[in-house]
Amino acid sequence: MSRWLLVLGFGASALAFACDDETVEVVEKEVCYSGMRWVGDKRGSPEMFPGRDCVGCHIENDGPPLALGGTIYPYVLGPQSPGLLAAQSGTDCFGVEGIEIVIEDGDGQQYAVTTNRAGNFYVEGNPDDFAKPFSATITVINPFDGDPIVNPMNFRPQYGGCANCHNPAAEPFTPPGLEQGDVDDRTVQPAARIGINGYGTGEGGFDSISDELNYMGCVADESLRGERVCENLFEDYGPPPDSNVAP
């Protein structure tokens, strides 16, 4: 295996654009929790197209080759809870900065990367030179005691474009490199967007960002208000703003 892979991680010193720059748009929190999203189309930047399949996009558009790439958000958005995050409806939303990811390839070589302002991380290099299957571990700092919280990935994927699978809106697909067939393990089900359960504390007295976003989704979609998840949130945080139910 070639060892020329270059690890790129962008933290606080990431290439930054002013809020009125043509590549980044300031949006309402209900659209993107971070308040920012990418609008620069295919202009090359470490912050481009957060939440998309970086590896596949670079292959299709003849961009610099990437062995692996993804985006981390401060909440989990999954196919098991449709509509509950309806308020978070934007695409290309920025994620969370400063999260450490350690990737170990199939040969045991480790790569440490840190998410940039857009929440993006990646390893630059030819995908064929990246030994698979690989594993990944996300580490965040507990804001209460300062200790690291380690979140290992539960499976070892064969493809480095994280959002190809971590896309709750995707249809089941055949993994790259395999022919379409009826074998069960050749069909990949979409997984939840990469996020951190309970990360941080949302505004307005919410216990977590996930609770805040779910509450906003329940308020935005009246058809969900009878769901038990929504009822639990309303019990915890008060009725929806337009409700006649006493708090």
Image (cartoon, rainbow, N blue to C red):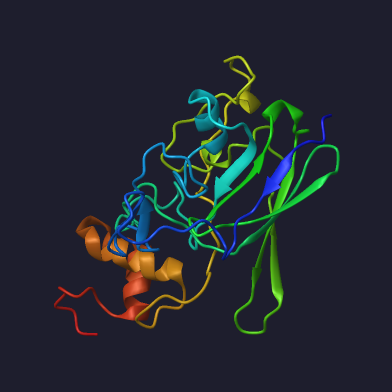
Of 5 and 91, the residue lying toward us: 5
Q: Position of residue 129 (x, y in %)?
A: 75, 29
Quadrant location of the C terminus in the rendered image: bottom left
Please name the residue shown 32% across and 69% down the image. 231
Please name the residue shown 51% across and 48% down the image. 192
Determine the image quadrant of residue 42: top left
Determine the image quadrant of residue 49: top left
Q: Inspect this view and state whether residue 226 appears.
A: no
Residue 159, placed above or below residue 240:
above
Q: Position of residue 27 (x, y in %)?
A: 29, 60
Q: Position of residue 165 (x, y in %)?
A: 54, 38
Of 243 and 109, the residue lying toward us: 109
Quadrant location of the N terminus in the rendered image: top right
Q: Position of residue 90 (x, y in %)?
A: 32, 51
Residue 91, placed above or below residue 3:
below
Total numbered labels = 0
Please name the residue shown 47% across and 77% down the image. 201
